[in-house]
Each structure stands twice: as structure tokens, then as C-alpha cells.
Image: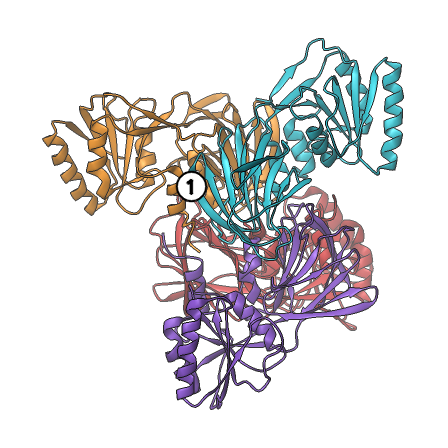
Chain colours: A orange, B cyan, C red, D purple
């Protein structure tokens, strides 16, 4: 069931690295890593974490940081087939499963074409206003509509495949991929969804109506959420990082993206192991 | 996305009816329905709700009752391709979507081969004890391990595809199909899962560890739950109706069944409409 | 247990009325009510809902609107002994229990000194910054620290009676009175607290750590919540209406106010009846 | 706010000890403790954990075990003024706050009359059947009505001070003291209630109606819960240990007991510290 595949004999020549900004210790890790890669005749490209696309001819993109840096990195290679390797500079992350200790062993395995790869569903979205479409970044985790600076709750109308679902009054609504289920959605009461389930998860944030529960719809669903609140403040957030101010009547459309994201997995940790460790399961 | 299909020109000659037991008003509905069907030259078979299989040559099985009667009826046609039509004798049900008023109009449409049909995932399970397998009824909603008459919580070990997931201490664990997500699982804090999502949902009941959340795994998962509690009381329940007492070490295996269940849907109600009505959404 | 008392022979001469702004139908109700009161020789004062204190010599303040207008009205009579009567212009409210139909019958009872009165706990708070204290409005429902326009969660440090409680990372924290338990706190997963329980309720909003649960502390508690996030956006909100932008290091102090708020209750509805009606309990 | 008091100069001569049954390592701890106490001229009485009352002239009752043993011990001294000291043989408990390492230091402090004591609310209850009252054990944590061996949910009617509250359909209902809020109630979604809040907490277990939330009522409330289900299986449980089979129409009455339970607290751990440790708060 684990959505893994074995790469065979990929030549990894050109390697990008993204480092979490303002992380002094990470800088040392980066420098050592660059040296190590140069000694193995790899071309190394340092990628700024915040803006613009990474070169499309990278063979691998290494992320040094936490899950936030990883999400940001995923947007740098939007639509490309470059696999991502997440190295966590602190504790273990849901996306950055490789610890600092494991970098070199993992890379050696990768260069021998001996590694596991996940192919993760991502979400594509655009905001529709007055008949115009404003494309938004593709996300790995979630698209969230939120009241933002507004002090009261917002009204949202949810439609799926042109079928009216419901109107909710809440602080917001998280539309997430299975990967995103362990992010913001989990804090707001959502379930855990294994990355290989084909679904889109809708989790209301502090809903006024207590029967508004998280709901999973098929990954083929065309989700449309319309802001029915006339006030300044509400925003759409993409992976909790990019922000787009919303106006009354704006419709946020979310669908599963055609291209999936390639993530290199730790060979030593199953999905459930990461869950147990992150959620501190199993201890009495 | 709605998992519907259009039947073409099926001759519906032999029709079974299951009536909820001890339902005096339902008896009148049944009698009138039988008359109505006889006038249309249908062969009508009355099926006892509790035990044994229905005749396998039925063209349609009508359920008069609530969701409980419907679940029971589904087990009467296990493995057969007979479509089920649920008529609710009381208020609207998640499974019995047709109201009493709509029976005849709906049947007339069906006899003209003009109707919608859902194909629902079901769950197959067996209990493994000392190397022997005891097959259990196929369920539409859920298989639940529960402490039963025991006054304290039970220990359960969860394995998926032979990968250890976690050990939980709880009142129980509900393993449900998407259809079952609006049943017992919802009361225990589980999410709503659209019937066409391919997944199995695991919802802990009153878990001792607060981070034990509902989790969705792919429908291809082979779920195994082992009872680690040495005491009398714990049971496995199948659709909340059939009960099997469990002993220390018993392993309940749950997988998606190969055959899906055919349910005839109301043409007047979308899935989301039933949700709104049952969960009283949309009212301020 | 219902915290009621019987007023004896209070002469009600001067009556204030607050009308929900921008409510055309409410205007007609107001006009009719003023006429009715004038005929009974009452002095009537129209109070603007938004700002400033009401005259301190009012014998009664009538609120025409919803719970929001009621909360706003409560701040207009802060520290005064004026009883509030809430008339709901729409559906039933938790605070505005009198319907439009019941206005005149209720007022006639009140003028005969035949009515029930609740005495509700309120919360006093101030924000401490660089050693200075900025007093904030006394609230009936809640004081909330919230991330506001910030896209990521905030860090909060909670101290009670100078004892460190915990640090949470969340969208925010609601500190509410029992009356406020059926407001924002309920949407965020908090329990219902009967108004006559002496307690302060702390409810985290979308907490990162799943074990951060709502907690009730005695009404004598001195709650202090310090913002540990260095970023623009976070705010303190008072009854969800008044907003105060917070900076890194700001400490919001919350205690039970010395003066309680007098609310005139409907003689026809118990607290539990209002709960049942608002939460739609009791229907199958 | 911590409900503590300082005992002055109590002569502690006669000391009872209750050991968790079937705990081989605990036996060694017990033997060493008895020796240590004998050397200090104390009279030591070993109390069987399961049944009967402890001698009423004990000056202190030491519990060696977990929270379960502590709850059982509390029933052994029902109505007596004997303080309880809980020593946890495993990890930290909510009630057994003293670790094995701390026994002797703690006892030396106690014998110098230098210790903190909590006075905890307990719950008294009886079952009413056909006009007869069957008194039940006083509990420290909770009285629970549960479906027990029954496979379907039960109907319960809740009344407080003779006022109808609501009818719920659920797996059960937990009526708990503030102390019990961190027990079964917490697993079923209840809030944490500081032991010095005067309240009774009602937490539904897997309620059919999603708006049935935990509710706190004043400690003066007379709670009555009537079983409306006609079937074998349902039980009342007292501190999760004593079980009483319920019949249709049985009314379980619960009120705050007149006598409170004295618990000797660890001087090194605040209530919030125990919470943090048990709920693993504060770690990222």
C-alpha cells in the first residue's frame, strides 16, 4: 500500500539545495554537504527558499530545514519532475523525515539508485473574481480560506462538481491533500489521511454549527468555496505561506493537480513510524 | 463524482421485500405495496429480516424500515448482484433515502429502467484464533472491536499490510467503510467520507491517548487488529448487529470485499442534500 | 441551582433602549415599544449601541437585536447595577431570550416586580506592555488572543496565579466566562458551562499539540497570557468586538470582575430549554 | 487557588498501606516501607485493596500502585477523615503523584507536619428502582451509565434539580467530579477541570447527536439519569470499578457528597506540572 517505487540507474549530476533562512547552524550543515557533493563530482546549485522557480534541469533538490521550508521548496519546482529530499535540521518532520545524521548514508543510497520514492497528490487552485481567474500556487498541503484580521466569523458557500454542499459560518475552511492532513487540518480536528488515499479533505475551523464535520471527497472533486462575507480581512492561504486577500463574492476553486510531487522517503521509517513518533503514540 | 450508473432495460420480475420487525404501521405499507406490485404482474417474496440468505434470483430487494433494517438486508444478499432499495418508514435515513410518499413514483421509474445506482464498498472480515479462521459476515458499515461488558478499556494492536501501526488503549476501535462513516464512527468523532472515496476508516472510541485520531488508509489495506486484553467481555460487532465474543490474542482481519453492494438512489436527493438534512446543516 | 432572585417593588421609571444598527424592521419594533412605554408614563432614552456609557440612572436597559448587540450593550453599562433585558429580533439567542412576541407581556411582569434575574460573572482585563497597564473593556463572554492577520500560528505562555501552566502554539486562546462558553469557545471545541458555575474557561483554538484541551480553573484565578510571537498581526479581542493589536511580550491579564451583570430572564424558559432549542437537541 | 492547607502537629501513629494486587515488585517496596515505618515506631496495618472498610482510626493511608488502586483505596475510607498518600509504582499518575524515589522524603515531611493537602469533591449516588433506593459507593472520579454488553446505543433522560435537561442516545454518559475530569471523561472528549472548581461534569460517550457536548453544572446540582432502553446489558459503573446492572426505568441519582476526600499532595509538583507531564505538553 505504501506508494513507493524503485528508481533505477538515474544519473544524479546536478543537485539543488535549499536552506531554511536565518538558520546559522544549518549554514555549517550546508557547507559540509556542498563539499561532500563536490568531492563526488556533483554540480551543486544553491536555491533561495523564497521566490522564483528552481532550474528545471536539477536531478535532485535537497531541503535543509523543517516542513515549512519543504513546502516552500515544493513551490520552487512546481510542475517539474525533480524529486525532493527533506533533511530536518531540528526534530523529525512529517515531510522532512531524514535527520541530519542520516544525510550522507541516504545520499549514497540515492546515488546507487537504491531508494524509495513517494508520489504525492498536490492541489491546484485559482481565485475567480468578476469573471477573471487569478492562478494561485500549487500546494502540497492545503488551501485555506480564513477570516484573517476580521474579528468575526465568515460565511462560506461550498460547492462540489457544481453541486451545492452547504454554507458554513466559521473562522475558516481548510481544503487539504492527504499529505496536508497532518498539518493545519489536524490541529482543527481533521483526521489523518494516508498519502496514498485519493481524496481531498475539507476541515472547518471553529464552525458555528457543531455538526459541521471534516469531510473527505474523491480526488476528482472540483471544489469551489465562495466568500459570502462583505468585510475586509478574509484571506486565502496557500500552504500557510502565500496569502491572497479575498473580497465578497470571490470564489476559490481547488482541484487535484495533474502532476504529483516526488518525495524521497527514508528507507528506515514507515509512514506509521513517523506518525507514532510525531504524535507520541505508544507511550503509556 | 457521484458513483452512479444508468441501468438499461433490466426486466424486474421477482421482487423481495424485507419489513422491519414489530412495526405495525409498516405492515399496512407492506400490504399496499404487495397489492400494487401484484397488479403490475410482479412476483413478490417476503424475506424475514433476521436470518439466512435471500433467493439469489431476485431482481430487486425493497427494504421497509430504517438504516438498521437496511444493514441487515444487505447481509441477506451477501455476494449477490441484487440491487437494494431502502424506504424509510420514519424520518430520512442515510441508507434509506426514499420516503414512504415516494415509493410508487420511484418504483415506476425503476421499472422504466430510469434510476440511479450507487455501488458501495463493503468490508470482509474473519477472526483468527489459534491459527484457525472464523469467517464473519460481510458488512456495509463497520466492524467494531469493543470492550463490551468489560468495565475497563481494552488494548488493541493495529497492523496494516503487516506493518505495525500502533497499540491503542480505548473503549474500542471502529473499522468502517466510507458508507459507515456517517454511522457509529461519526458519533465517535470520525470524519464524513463520501461513498466514492476508496478508503477504510479507523476511528478509536474514547482513546486513552488523546493523540489517537481517526485515520484513513487506502481501500487496498489489509487491516489486522489483535486483542491484547486478557479478560471476559470484549466483542467484535459487525454492522452493530452480529456479535462475536473475543479472547486474548484473537486477530480480527478486515479488508475491502471484492463485491460491492448496489444501492438504488433517490433521483431527487444528492448525497450532500441527505447530509444537510440529517445533520441539520444550513440553518442558522 | 438556577441563579435567580426576585426583585421586589423596584420602581422602573427611566428606561433605556439599544437597537441593533441598520435593522429596518427593528426600527418599527422600537417605535411601537417607545409609544407603549410612554403611555405607561416611562421616561425613554435611546442609547447608541456603539460607544460611550449609558446614563447611570437608568432603571432598565432593553436590547433589541441579537447576542452581538447584547454584548455591546453590556459594555455600555459597565460597572452599573442596571438590569438588561434582551429581546431577539430574529431567532432565539443565548443572551436575548425574549422573542418579539413576548416583549409586552414580559415588561408588564417586570413593572409588577414579577420577574427572574440572573447575576452573571464578567471578566476584567488589561494588557501589560513595558510595565504599563492598558485597561480593556469588561466582557460578558470572552477575551481572545488570536493570530489575526498572521498566516502562521502564535506562541502563547499561560500563567495562573503566577504558576506556569503551559506554552501553546495555536491559532489562539479563548478565555471565557461561563456565559461565554456557548459562544466562540463552543465552536472551538469547548464544553458548555452553566452560568452559575464559578469558573474561568480556557479553550485553545486549533492547537498544534493535540493534547491541549479546554481547561476550567476557579473564578478566583488570575490568568495571564503572554504573546511570545514576534510578528505583526496578533490581536486581543474583547467579546469579539473590540480589538487591540498585540506585540511580542504583551501580557493579557484576565480575572473575574467584582461586579456581576444583571440579566432579566424569560420566566417561560429554563437555561436547559434554551440549550435544547439552540443546539437542536432532542430531535432524533 | 490551589486548594491546599497546612496540617499542624498531627501525630501520625497508625498507618495503613494498600498495595496494588499482583504486583511482585511492589511487594519489595511494601516490605522496605513497613520496615522503615516500624523503625520510626509507627503501627502499620496492611489493607486488602478490594473489599471492606479500613480501620477508622488510621492517621494516614498510603497507596502503592496506580490511579486505579488509589480510587479503590478511596472507597475503603469512605466518609472517614483519613488522608490518602498515593505512591505510583510505575509512571506518574494524576492521583498518585509521588514517585517511588520520593516516598521517604515525603513521609519525613509529613511526620514533621510539613505537607500540602487537597480536599477533593466526591460524588454520592444511588439507583432508584420501583420506588426503592439502592445506595452505591461514593466515588472520587465518576459514575458512568454505559451500554455495557449491549451492541446498540442506549437512551438516557437527564434531569437536574427536577428540571428536564435532555434525552440523549449514546454509548453512555459520564458524570464526573473535577478530579475525574482527567479520567474517562477526558478520553471521551471532556475538558480538564481544576480540582478546586465547584462543579459536576457530564460527558456523553459517542453521542448520536453531534451537538451533545460535555456540560458543567454547579456542584449543588442534583443529577438524575434515567435509562429509557429496554434491553439487557446496560450498567452503572462507579469509578470504573464497581458495576451495577441497570434495567429499563432505573434512575441513577448523583450529587456531591457532603464529605470531601483528603489527598496529600507532592510539595514538588503543582497541578499544572502534573498535567504537563501526563499530557506531554510543552514539547514541540
Find residue A264 and report its image quarter: top left
Depth check, front residue: A17 or C147: A17
Circle 1 sits on which residue? B164
* Percent position of residue D169, x then y: 70, 49
Q: Residues within 10 Å of mark 1 (few under 14, many from 20)?
A: some
Q: Chain of mark 1?
A: B
Query: In this view, which residue lies farthest toward the left?
Result: A39
Depth check, front residue: D142 or D231: D231
Depth check, front residue: D85 or B162: B162
Vertical placement of A277 versus C84: above or below?
above
Tell me which residue sits at (34%, 22%) in the image.
Answer: A79
Vertical placement of A113 versus B202: above or below?
above
- Left or right of C115, for residue C74: left
Q: Is residue C88 visible?
A: no
Depth check, front residue: C94 or D228: D228
* Percent position of residue C190, x then y: 56, 54
* Percent position of residue C199, x then y: 57, 66
Tell me which residue sits at (54%, 28%) in the image.
Answer: B197
* Percent position of residue D131, x then y: 83, 67
- Label 1 sits on a secondary structure element that is strand
Q: Quadrant of the C terminus of chain B?
A: top right
Tell me which residue sits at (23%, 40%) in the image.
Answer: A102
Vertical placement of C62 versus C257: above or below?
above
Q: Is residue B158 visible?
A: yes
Find residue A30 and report its image quarter: top left
Q: Quadrant of the N terminus of chain B?
A: top right
Amino acid at each position: 500500500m505504501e506508494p513507493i517505487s524503485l528508481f533505477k540507474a538515474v544519473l544524479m549530476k546536478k543537485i539543488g539545495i535549499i536552506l531554511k533562512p536565518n538558520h546559522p547552524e544549518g549554514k555549517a550543515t550546508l557547507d559540509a554537504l556542498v563539499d561532500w557533493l563536490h568531492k563526488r563530482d556533483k554540480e551543486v546549485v544553491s536555491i533561495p527558499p523564497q521566490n522564483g522557480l528552481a532550474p528545471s534541469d536539477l536531478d535532485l533538490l535537497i531541503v535543509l530545514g523543517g516542513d515549512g521550508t519543504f513546502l516552500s521548496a515544493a513551490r520552487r519546482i512546481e510542475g517539474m519532475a525533480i524529486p525532493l529530499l527533506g533533511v530536518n535540521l531540528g526534530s523529525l518532520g512529517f515531510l522532512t523525515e531524514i535527520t541530519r545524521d542520516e544525510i550522507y548514508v541516504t545520499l549514497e543510497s540515492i546515488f546507487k539508485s537504491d531508494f524509495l520514492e513517494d508520489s504525492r497528490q498536490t492541489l491546484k487552485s485559482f481565485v475567480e473574481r468578476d469573471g477573471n481567474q487569478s492562478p494561485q500556487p500549487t500546494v502540497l498541503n492545503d488551501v485555506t480560506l480564513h477570516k484573517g484580521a476580521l474579528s468575526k466569523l465568515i460565511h462560506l458557500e461550498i460547492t462540489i462538481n457544481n453541486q451545492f454542499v452547504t454554507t458554513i459560518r466559521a473562522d475558516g475552511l481548510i481544503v487539504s491533500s492527504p499529505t496536508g492532513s497532518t498539518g493545519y487540518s489536524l490541529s482543527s480536528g481533521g483526521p489523518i489521511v494516508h498519502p496514498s488515499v485519493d481524496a481531498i479533505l475539507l476541515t472547518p475551523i471553529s464552525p458555528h454549527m457543531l455538526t459541521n464535520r471534516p469531510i473527505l471527497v474523491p480526488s476528482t472533486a472540483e471544489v469551489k468555496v465562495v466568500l459570502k462575507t462583505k468585510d475586509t480581512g478574509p484571506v486565502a492561504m496557500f500552504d500557510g505561506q502565500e496569502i491572497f486577500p479575498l473580497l465578497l463574492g470571490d470564489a476559490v476553486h481547488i482541484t487535484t493537480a495533474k502532476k504529483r510531487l516526488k518525495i524521497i522517503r527514508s528507507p528506515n521509517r514507515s509512514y506509521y513510524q513517523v506518525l507514532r513518533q510525531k504524535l507520541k503514540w505508544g507511550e503509556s
